[in-house]
Amino acid sequence: MYFFLASFLIFSVALFTAGYYLWTVPQQQAEDILGGRLREVRASTRSRSKGGSELVRQERRGSFAFLGDLVTWVGILRRLQETIDQANLKNRAADVFGFSVLLAITTFVVFGFAGGAGLLFVRLLAALVIGMAPIFYIVRVRAKRLRKFEEQLPDAIDLFTRTMRAGHNIHSGLETIATETADPVKMEFKKIMEELALGSQLEPALHGLGKRVPLIDLKFFVTSLILQRQTGANMVSVLEGLSTLVRERLNMAAKLKAHTAQQRFSAGLLCVLPIVVGVGFYILKPEYVRLLWTDPVGTKFFTYAIISEIVGILVIRKIANIRV
């Protein structure tokens, strides 16, 4: 048995090392060529203005950057980094991934020492949940920021349309949004103005905004600006209708949330009730609850209860989460 496990581990490590070598060598050669060109640009920039700020952006590599090199081909870290950027956090995806893996392994080992060696499924589930905690936090911050951006978007569109009605161009309208609104709208439109000041074209800058803030209403706004720039059509009335539509949708969502508050509270109570009852029984009669992880039959029932609880929470969340 031990010989089979050792052979499997050696074969897996060798196969993974060979795949990693075949993947990174061509990519490293391309990065070396690009790095040489960037060094030439940086040298010419420094020779023109000594002591000035560099126009070449340097990406800061995190402490766990080697993990990023290992699993970049999967695309996980790329999507995670996009989520972090959309949440406006300064972390690197490789650091978050490495910390999550370390947290999951530590949880699995600690639960094993705590006497739950027989509950392999519970240990794996606890390690997965606790290991995913940093990612859950990032997703929560991202959702909160996008919600705030969506609430401020109608006022920003109205401000832009008033600027256009006064006879200004698109650049002036975007600059007005970047100076007269509040964060996070102000921050994102300031990035557009900085990109335009550094020589970027308007359409790539607007597409970058749509990537940083993946809201369908903002994509409509970006599409309207691009069409107005390409065709010269009058998009003021369209933007006014868009701001009205966004406000009505937000108002409907607020009313729906208010009308379903009791039902959502009941759903949350049903989800939390088994956990509260289990903790209460463990405090009052620990010998009754301890059978769930000391007896083989109790272990099976405990595993089935956890799976049923997770499935129930997901089903209730799906029913209660109404998209407007």
Image (tube, rainbow, N blue to C red):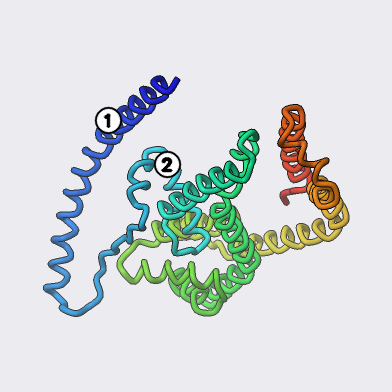
Give residue 317's position: percent from left, percent from top: 74, 45
Distance from disc 2 to disc 1, alpha carbons, whole Å, reads: 19 Å
Quadrant in which the N terminus is drawn = top left
Whether residue 16 is visible to the viewer of this picture, yes or no, is yes
Q: Which residue is mark 1?
A: 18
Q: Which residue is mark 2?
A: 75
**Residues at discs 2 and 1 in contact (Cβ within 8 Å):** no
Q: Amino acid at mark 1?
A: Ala
Judge whether 70 appears above or below 253 on screen: above
Give residue 64's position: percent from left, percent from top: 37, 53
Q: Quadrant of residue 61?
A: bottom left
Disc 1 on helix, strand or loop?
helix
Give residue 304's position: percent from left, percent from top: 74, 32
Disc 2 on helix, strand or loop?
loop
Disc 1 residue crowd, few under 14, some 14–19, many 20+, Cα 10 Å: few
Q: Amino acid at mark 2?
A: Gly
Rendered residue at 42%/68% (across/down): 191
Disc 2 residue crowd, few under 14, some 14–19, many 20+, Cα 10 Å: few
Whether residue 271 is visible to the viewer of this picture, yes or no, is no
Give residue 117's position: percent from left, percent from top: 61, 36
Q: Is residue 119 left or right of residue 311?
A: left
Rendered residue at 33%/63% (across/down): 200
Q: Quadrant of residue 112?
A: top right
- Please report whichever mark, 2 or 1, sits nearer to the chain's N-terminal start: 1
